[in-house]
Image (cartoon, rainbow, N blue to C red):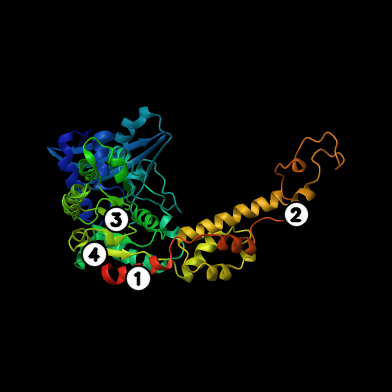
Amino acid sequence: MTTWRIRDFHPSDLDSILHLWSAMTESGIEPVYSLSEVLASCQADYAVVAVQGEDIVGAAVGRAAHEQGWIVFLATLPESRGRGIGTGLLASLEQRMAPLGLTKLSALMPDTETRIDAFLNRGFKDVKNLRFFERQIPVQRAELGPLAQLGGRVLPRDLWANVAGMQREKQLLERRLVLPLAEAELADEFGVVPPRAVVLFGPPGTGKTTFAKAIASRLEWPFVEVFPSRLAADPEGLAGALRRTFLEIAELEHAVVFLDEVEEIASRRAGDPPSPTQGVTNELLKIIPAFREQPGRLLVCATNFIRALDPAFLRHGRFDYVIPIGLPDAEARHAMWNRFIPEAVVASVDVALLTARTEGFSPADIEFAARSASQRALEKAVYSPAAVSAAGPTDGGPSDGGASGGGASDGGPSAPRNGRRGPTTEDYLEAISETKTTVGEEVAAAFLEDIEDLARV
């Protein structure tokens, strides 16, 4: 005689689901779906329980996605197995989901699961040669609203890989910042406290903003850029707006917060009467310690003029690292040129020569020169006398007149007819010679002094 029955799940059954979950994991089976997913589906989707007397001895949970149904959880207590409870739970769950018009009901099982009789008894097929892939979504739905209000976004995952060259800086940032934040539990085992705030300093155009975004991309954390110039127009004033912004950021589970040109709001405090920014600097000095108390966050401040920062701003306890981001070395410049030169012509361009000719160029300078060379090459291909001559009349009439409808003969653009399909080494050298570098010798020398005096890596 059957001594168990099946009924619908009630909210008061949560403790029993937890008990079933624990019994499953203690037997060495790691469920495919997380406990939070199972509990959420119990209350929002479909769930049935098997009851013997006053005790719950089994449960099945399912959810539907369009015409596809999924078994999220199926478990029975060890002492109740082999009595057909699992088969009964699946049958009852399928019956309750039938009005949805499902065309398929599927289940994912861990490799360690050997009790599959319940599924086979209900007509499920063991599909071979399938692999299960999953990925955690970095931003949860509840965070999307606050993130949008802050103007934040989740950046593409490939930004880190797309940072051309700069291997020395990438390796430093990977080891000091990304590793302890991405592997927080492992870092804790080694006694490493994950960083909470860092300063990136260096000449203009060296890629500090790019690195800040790449760090967020590498961690898969939302990127929130704070613009002091925009906050200054707030009725509360810059200090009040800054305070409120960081309170809103605290609602996010994870975030890389970026403050560019931080010297504008954290400059040296001096003089009598106080400078207009002194109140803002004081507020920022209060915000950073509070920010540091929140896990899952990283504040990245960038500056072109680190000497202008208030000494109290840089002290230990506020910033974990003060990292220089300088001009790219030869290896980095070579990688950048390979990235910016069109793939169709890169083999015919003397990249080594371009690398040598751009010593002292910043990444921004190299990108400008590359874009400029491409634009010039395009114009030469279309508008040069050879290209115009090759194009000829556009209406098939005589070349000395007639009722031609325009085209190359009247100065308009035409498709290149001279075989030219991209910039050459000469185009790049011409663009390089006319590019004004961002960083002069004096600035470069001062940067080396700042590394010696202020860097902390």
Mark 2 burial class by Cα count in 10 Å: few <14, some 14-19, many 20+:
some
Mark 1 burial class by Cα count in 10 Å: few <14, some 14-19, many 20+:
some
- Residue in the picture at 53% in, 68% down: 355
Relative to 151, is 442 above or below? below
Task: Please report whichever mark, 2 or 3, sits nearer to the chain's N-terminal start.
Answer: 3
Disc 1 residue type?
Answer: Leu
Q: Which of these two is toward me, 34 or 454? A: 454
Q: Residues under labels 4 and 2: Cα distance?
A: 60 Å
- Residue in the picture at 30% in, 63% down: 179
Q: Residue 322: where, in percent of width, then height?
A: 27, 64
Marks 1 and 2 in Cβ contact (< 8 Å): no
Task: Please report whichever mark, 1 or 2, sits nearer to the chain's N-terminal start.
Answer: 2
Q: Which mark is residue 300?
A: 3
Which is closer to the viewer, label 4 or label 1? 1
The residue pinned by badge 1 equals 448
Mark 4 burial class by Cα count in 10 Å: few <14, some 14-19, many 20+:
some
The residue pinned by badge 4 equals 187
